[in-house]
Every structure is written in structure tokens, then in C-alpha cells.
Image (cartoon, rainbow, N blue to C red):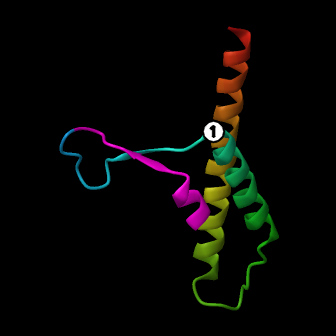
Amino acid sequence: MRRVWRDMERVAAGRRAKLGTARVAVKEGRLIRDLEELIAALDRRLPGVEQAGEVAIAQDAAALRAKAIARLAELADAELLKTRH
């Protein structure tokens, strides 16, 4: 996570950005690699069904994985559009 944070650059959403509204710019190649790493890590994770809260954690992990895959698809579509023009 520290590596990802180092590669980020805060971009002000306005002169007085509200808490939680500041946008973050990340290099696209780094973002793709980090999303792929995240998906791989989530795929390696084995749920411990006997642990309290594990069902919720597994559901959150599945939702995060789906969002990461969707973001990768968006980036791939954007890259495809760039190469056509």
C-alpha cells in the first residue's frame, strides 16, 4: 500500500476541497498492475468460515474484486479508444 500511496499525487478538487472529495491521480500502468495484484490476492484468500464476521468479509472481498475487474475493463476500453484515434 505504501508503494501505491507514494505513486499517487493529490489533485485538489477545488480551492476548498471538502473532506473526502479530493481526487487522486495515479499513473495508469501502475494502476493496472495494482488492480491485477489486488485481484490475485483476493483469489488466493481462503475464507475461514469458523471465524466471526467471515461471511461479511468474504462478501466485501467479492464486491471489491468485482469493482477491480470492472475498473480494469474501463481502463482497457479507454486504451482501445486511444489507439483508434
Tag 1's secondary structure? helix
Residue 36 in magenta stretch: no
Judged left or right of residue 63, residue 11 is left
Asked whether 80 or 57 is in front, the reply is: 80
Residue denoted by label 1:
28
Establish if 68 lies above or below 45.
above
Q: Residue at x 73, y 85 (%)?
A: 48
The answer to if 5 sits in the magenta stretch is yes
Q: Nearer the viewer, residue 13 or 3?
A: 3
Q: Give how far across and how far down residue 41 sits, in percent.
A: 75, 66
- The residue furthest top is 85
Residue 75 percent coordinates (x, y): 66, 33
Examine the rendering and report whether any part of residue 73 can be seen.
yes
Mark 1 surroundings within 10 Å by alpha-carbon count, few (fewer than 14), some (14 through 19), many (20 or more): few
Q: Amino acid at mark 1?
A: Glu
Total count of labels: 1
Q: Residue at x 78, y 77 (%)?
A: 46
Percent of width and height locating residue 28:
63, 39
| 58 up-or-down from 32: above or below | below
Q: Is residue 76 left or right of residue 22?
A: right
x, y percent for residue 21: 31, 48
Q: Dividing the image into 4 quarters, which one contains the N terminus?
A: bottom right
Extreme residue toward the left, this view: 16
Residue 1, visible in the rendered structure: no
Up the image or down, 11 lies above or below 58; here it is: above
What residue is drawn where x is 70% and y is 91%? 50
The span picked out in magenta is 1-14
Q: Is residue 40 above or below residue 73?
A: below
